[in-house]
Image (cartoon, rainbow, N blue to C red):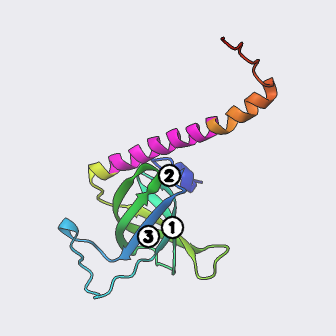
Amino acid sequence: MTTGDDRRRHSRFDILRARATIYRGPQGPEGLVVDARPVRKNWARTPIDLCEGGAQIVVSDRLEPGTAVYGAIDVDECAERIQIRGEIRWCAPLRGPEGAFRAGVMFKDLDPSQVRAISLVRECLVFVRIKALRAMKQPEEGKKRGSPPASPKKE
């Protein structure tokens, strides 16, 4: 039996400080909205994870699998905006806030620059997290070793 992880071509990574906008409907060339509705509703609340092939996003209402979507994911830690276009693959109720759902978005026809932006975000977040872990370890290591000896004063 093939699981979802076995079918993935790209590994997902968590994105913590990020915002998303997701609109229903196909998007035409140069970002022109093909959907004829006069008012666009942002269905996204927050992105959970991301990879070069898709994203998991918390949305405000149930979106049916097969629904065309477009929008953007802004990753604050990396000052990067990723323009997305894709399709809802699954949508399930989220434990917690009433009315919230988790949705899997499979990206379609992403521009190569957007695929590269996702790779850059992955690299950036790895760097940011390693830096944070090192900063957390430094005070701990100082406690384990004790205080460094005082350096002699020069007079």
Q: Of label 3 and label 1, which has the lower sequence position? A: 1
Q: Which mark is residue 7?
A: 2
Position of residue 119 relative to residue 94, above or below, is above
Secondary structure beneath disc 2? Answer: helix
Q: Where is residue 56 in the image (x, y as percent from the top left)?
A: 51, 62
Position of residue 70 relative to residue 152, above or below, is below
Q: Are marks 2 and 3 in contact (CB under 8 Å)?
A: no
Give me the residue at 41% from left, 54% from top: 53
* Residue in the foreground of this view, choosing between 55 and 14: 14
- Placement of the N terminus among the 4 image quadrants: bottom right
Report the residue marked by disc 3.
88
The boundaries of the magenta stretch are 115-134
132 to the left or right of 32: right
- Placement of the C terminus among the 4 image quadrants: top right
- Location of residue 37 by image quarter: bottom left
Give me the residue at 37% from left, 75% from top: 23
Query: What is the spatial separation of the Cα atoms under label 3 and label 1, in whole angstroms?
Result: 15 Å
Secondary structure beneath disc 3? Answer: strand
Q: Disc 2 marks which amino acid? A: Arg
- Which label sits in the foreground, 3 or 1? 1
Q: Where is residue 79 in the image (x, y as percent from the top left)?
A: 39, 52
Position of residue 142 relative to residue 53, above or below, is above
| 35 falls in the magenta region | no
| 125 falls in the magenta region | yes
Give me the residue at 21% from left, 71% from top: 28
Q: Of label 2 and label 1, which has the lower sequence position? A: 2
* Residue in the foreground of this view, choosing between 146 and 126: 146
Within 10 angstroms of label 2, few (less than 14), some, or many (20 or more) residues? few
Q: Disc 3 marks which amino acid? A: Ile
